[in-house]
Image (cartoon, rainbow, N blue to C red):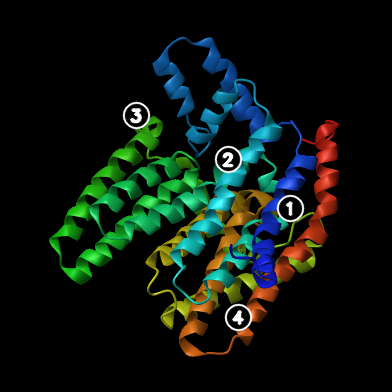
Amino acid sequence: MNMITPRQALFWFAVAAPALTHFTLLLLYSVNAPRLDDFSDGLTLLPQFYSTESLWEKFKIIFSQYQNHRWAFLHSIYFIYQCIDFRSANFISLIPLIALPWLWFRLFRTEKYAKTLLIISAAIVFNLHSWTGTFWITASLAAIPVVPLALMAFILITRNNWVSFWLAAITAIIATFTNGNGVTIWPIASLYLLYIAATTKENKYYVMLSVWIVFSAILLFVYFSKSILDHQIPGSNNIHGAFEKILSNPFLFIQGIFATVGSISMYHTSGLYYKLPLAISIGIIEIGALIWLFSQGALRKYPAIILLAVFILGTTTAITATRVVFLGIEQAFQGHYKLYNGVFLLILITAYLDYLSKNTHSKTHTYAVLASAYGLYLLSFVLFFPDIRQYHLELSTDTRN
């Protein structure tokens, strides 16, 4: 029987500690209390669902539209519970959160930096900078699961075979009805298939592209059916309003994109006068660095991660266009968006490690990146642990919405 060495034990402790800490915090502080959209969505749908005997009506309620989303996965969780337990439902979010670093490791398992990346991905995904999202059922079961689903769809579509193609389509459908930004998987994957078809000139990829476009058209019609059947351009009022806001204040829009990307470990509760320029500066550096690394060939073997970077930036742009320009720059610092800028940082770190593996044999930079990622995790724990206790104390005593 092989004994685990101290080094192996330390490695697995570093991987597991963030997830175990997250589980412990959920166990200690998560409360059975709704907040924000839980009132207008979940607690409104349940009476409608159980007041009708029609299976078709129940099906329509599950896939019903709320704002710009069709949260069929979240709604299904509501109806399985019958009466929602907001405390225990949050534990379901552990599944996609664990899936994300596992997928990352599986994708890069042949690289010499794979184990380092597993530790870093666990520290970033379970970082407490995203705690307000992971403790809120609407975010933990909608905004969070869509990220690993998007990654899975991109991994499958880039395998360039028919079995993976159909699995990618199924995964994209699930993502679409998990959170609104899942819709963007379809056009991003279409562009990838178009690029592959144009560069290889193989008929197989033109057929794949055609089938994917047909599926995209059908799904988008279903997703936006209410607007289409009402003879409206889907989201036309929102799009028109967003364009007006962007054109009236383009500087705010640009600030919002960079601040959303760079606001990791920052909230808008206080000190916005220094947090905003800091977040914008970090966002500019991160986006610029990732573009440079891509131009140097980093992650060229891993188009799924490049597609995910486009997905994250597209989501960030949508957040800015629909939230920041309407409600203010504070929206760029919201907790339930933190997994997006966390994953963007993870993409940047992965690209840097990939670049280092091709250009240097020194491990000094790799160790520095690992130490920085874990340092960020520990910093976030110190910063946000008191807030977690206070926040959920207020929820449990019904003094917070």
Q: Do callouts 3 and 4 mark residues in contact (Cβ within 8 Å)?
A: no
| Image quarter of residue 284 | bottom right
Q: Nearer the viewer, mark 1 or mark 2?
A: 1
The three-letter amino acid code for the residue at tag 4 is: Thr
The three-letter amino acid code for the residue at tag 3 is: Leu
Residue underneath mark 3: 229
N-terminal-most mark, 3 or 4: 3
In the depicted structure, whether residue 201 falls above or below residue 400: below
In the depicted structure, whether residue 72 falls above or below residue 158: above
Residue 9, given in percent of the width and then of the height, sits at: 68, 65
N-terminal-most mark, 3 or 2: 2
N-terminal-most mark, 1 or 4: 1
The numbered mark at residue 141 is 2
Q: Nearer the viewer, mark 1 or mark 3?
A: 1
Q: Secondary structure at mark 4?
A: helix
Rounded to the nearest angstrom, the CA distance separating label 3 from label 2 is 29 Å
- Residue at 70% x, 55% y: name it: 330
* Other residues around mark 1 within 10 Å, as few (<14) / some (14–19) / many (≥20): some
N-terminal-most mark, 1 or 3: 1
The three-letter amino acid code for the residue at tag 1 is: Thr
| Image quarter of residue 194 | bottom left
Q: Secondary structure at mark 3?
A: helix
N-terminal-most mark, 4 or 2: 2
The numbered mark at residue 21 is 1
Residue underneath mark 4: 366
